[in-house]
Each structure stands twice: as C-alpha cells, then as structure tokens.
Image: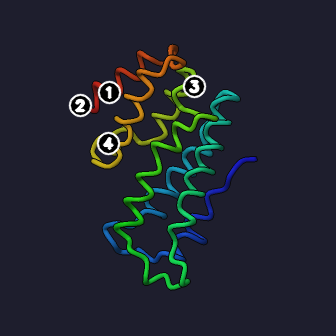
Amino acid sequence: MTPTCGVYTSCFADRCACDGSPFEYFKSYGAKYCTAFLELPGLSAKGAAWRNATLKCLQEKIVPLLPKDGQSKSCNCQQMQLSAFDSHVACYTQPSASICELDVSDWQKILAATDPVKTLQDQKSRKQLLVVARMCLVDPVAVQAKDVIQKVIDKLK
C-alpha cells in the first residue's frame, strides 16, 4: 500500500504546533520530502517498495512522540525535530527494505529528489545521509551502488 503525505499537515502539525519555530519539521521537511519521494518517477519495483516502507516507518516513528494530552502547545518542537531526524537512518535501512540494496538508478533518483544542494548545506541532513552512505558502503548486498555511495560520502566530507 502506498502511504500518503497529508498526515504531516493534517495531523502531526496540528498535534504539535511548531509554525514559526526554527525547529518546525512536519511541513517544511516531513511533508516536503514525503511528497518528493511519492512523486519520484521510474523507481524499480524494489525502489517503490523501499519508498513505501520508509515513508510508513517515518510516520509510525512520529506517532508515539506526539503530545498525549492533545494539547499542541505542550509539544517540544526542538525535541520533536531531533527525534524525527533520528528516525531517518533506521527507516532508510530497515532489514526488510534497505536503501543499501537498491540499484544505482534508484539511488540516483532518490538523491536527486532530496534537493542535493540544500541537503549538503543542512547539518542534520548531511549527518544522516553520511551515516546511511557509510552503512551502505560496507553492506555486502550494496555491490551495484558502491560507486554512487562513495561519491556521496566524498561530497559530504
């Protein structure tokens, strides 16, 4: 099943009101990249399965972090952003659907969708991308994409 991205703006952002905060995540990052990933043309079947599993995982990691009292003002925006970013590596490299096992063509499409210029400038994005790339570089299954992965690491250093 293909996930949807509306949950970031219609649910998460309502339950954790961070508009105007430097730590706002749901609209400026979560919804933005969820939509970019869903609109990726030409992913292989394995790439589409990775995308769907990853988006679902990212959304599921957020739910338990939302304020349980229903009061959006009680949400700690900085902690929410940090926790959301911290979930990226685990979701991208799940044993059942790891980016490390995708073909080079899928890697190239995914990297292009992540707005490489902005990603390289944002410290949190750089950090998670570097961690994922290093994990994939030593993954024995990631043989096909090793050259692309090494280029990513070289750019992030």
Could you tell me the amino acid type at mark 4? Answer: Lys
Classify mark 2: helix, strand or loop: loop
Q: CA distance from mark 3 to mark 2?
A: 23 Å
Which residue is painted at 55% across and 69% down in the image? Answer: 12
The residue where tag 2 is placed is 157
The residue where tag 4 is placed is 127
Which residue is painted at 57% across and 65% down in the image? Answer: 63
Could you tell me the amino acid type at mark 2? Answer: Lys
Residues at circles 4 and 3 in contact by the CB criterion of under 8 Å: no
Callout 2: few (<14), some (14-19), or many (20+) C-alpha neighbours within 10 Å? few
Image position, residue 25 (x, y; %): 43, 62
Could you tell me the amino acid type at mark 3? Answer: Leu
Image quadrant holding the C terminus, namely top left
Q: Which sits earlier in the primary sequence, circle 1 or circle 4?
A: 4
Which residue is painted at 70% across and 29% down in the image? Answer: 45
Classify mark 4: helix, strand or loop: helix
**For residue 38, which quarter of the picture?**
top right
Image position, residue 70 (x, y; %): 55, 83
Which residue is painted at 53% across and 58% down in the image? Answer: 31
The residue where tag 3 is placed is 102
Q: How many marks?
A: 4
Q: Which sits earlier in the primary sequence, circle 2 or circle 4?
A: 4
Q: Which sits earlier in the primary sequence, circle 1 or circle 3?
A: 3
Residue 153's mark? 1
